[in-house]
Image (cartoon, helix red, strand yellow):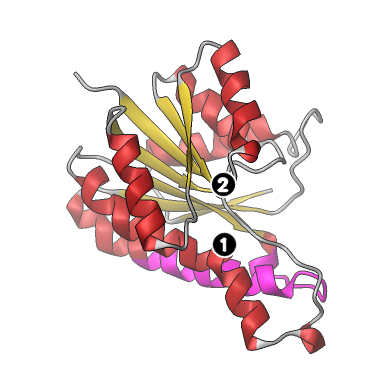
Amino acid sequence: MADKIALIVGPGHAGLGQAMAEKLGEQGYTIALLARHADALNGLVKTLTDEKITAFSVVADSSDPASVTSALQTIQQHGELQVVHYNATMRTKNKPSQLTAALVTESLQSNLLGAITVTNLALPIVEKTGGGVFLYTGSVVAAKPGPSDVEQAIGKAGLRDYVVALNKELHPRGVFAGMVTINTYIRAGRSGHMDPNVIAGAFMDLATKKNAAEVQYH
C-alpha cells in the first residue's frame, strides 16, 4: 500500500504549518512541504524528521501551473496524495490609497490565485483516493479589513467565496473542501487560543467532521 501524503502549501513561520504537519504526521501521513524557496522548508523538514515524522520539501511557485504540476509529479513519487492544506499568504502594508492594479495582482498570487491553481491541479489526483480533503487558511481581515492589510483582505475574501462554492461542488463527488477563518493572532509558544497547536486542532476537527464549508476560530 502506498504511503498517504498530506501537502502543506506555504508552511510559513507563524507555527501553524508546523503544527499541522505534526498532527497529520501523528496520523500516519508523510508530509510534503511546498514553498517558493528551499530555505523556508529545510529547517522544518529537519524538525519533523527529528520528531520521527516522514517529511520532504518541494520548491514551487503555487501560482505557476507548470511549477505546481512538476511539484505534484514529485509528490506522487512518494505516495498517494490525500490531503492538501493551502496556508500560503502575503501581507503588505500598502494603504488603500496607494494601491495599483499591479500591486493587488501580485498579492493575489499568494492569497487567492495560488490556491485556485493548486486545487485545480491536485484535485484529479486527490479525487482518485476517495474521501480526499482540501483545507484553506482564512483570516478575520476578509470581513474586517484595515488600512494596512487591505491587499490580504481582498485575497482572503475572494478565497472564502471560492472555498464555499468549491465545497458545494465537490461534496457530491466525495471530496471535502473547507476553511478555518482565524479570528486571532498565531503565536507559537503561547498557550491558549493563539497557540498554533490549538488552531491546528480546529483544522483537524473540520477535516474529520466535514460538516461545514467554513469554521470561525476565535
In the displayed structure, 201 sits above or below 142; it is: above
Q: For residue 167, which quarter of the picture?
A: bottom left
Give the residue at mark 1: 110
Q: Which mark is residue 40?
A: none
**Residue at x 66%, y 61% (from the top left corner):** 90
Amino acid tagged 1:
Ser
Residue 13 vertical placement versus 64 (above, below): above
94 or 214, which lies in front? 94
**Residue 145 highlighted magenta (yes or no):** yes
Magenta stretch, main secondary structure class: helix
Q: Quadrant of residue 190?
A: top right
Name the residue at 43% across, 52% down: 178
Image marks 1 and 2: residues in contact by CB distance under 8 Å: yes
At x 52% / y 10%, what residue is drawn? Answer: 52
Residue 194 showing in the rendered view: yes
**Residue at disc 1, secondary structure:** helix
As helix, strand or loop, the secondary structure at mark 2 comes to loop
Please give the range of residues in magenta.
141-165
Q: Which residue is mark 2?
A: 10
Expressed as whole percent of the image width and height from the top left, the position of residue 142 reads: 64, 68
| Residue 66 location (% of width, % of height) | 35, 59
- Earlier in the chain: of badge 1 and badge 2, it is 2
Q: CA distance from mark 1 to mark 2?
A: 9 Å
Question: In the rendered view, would you say 153 is above or below 33?
Answer: below
Number of disc labels: 2
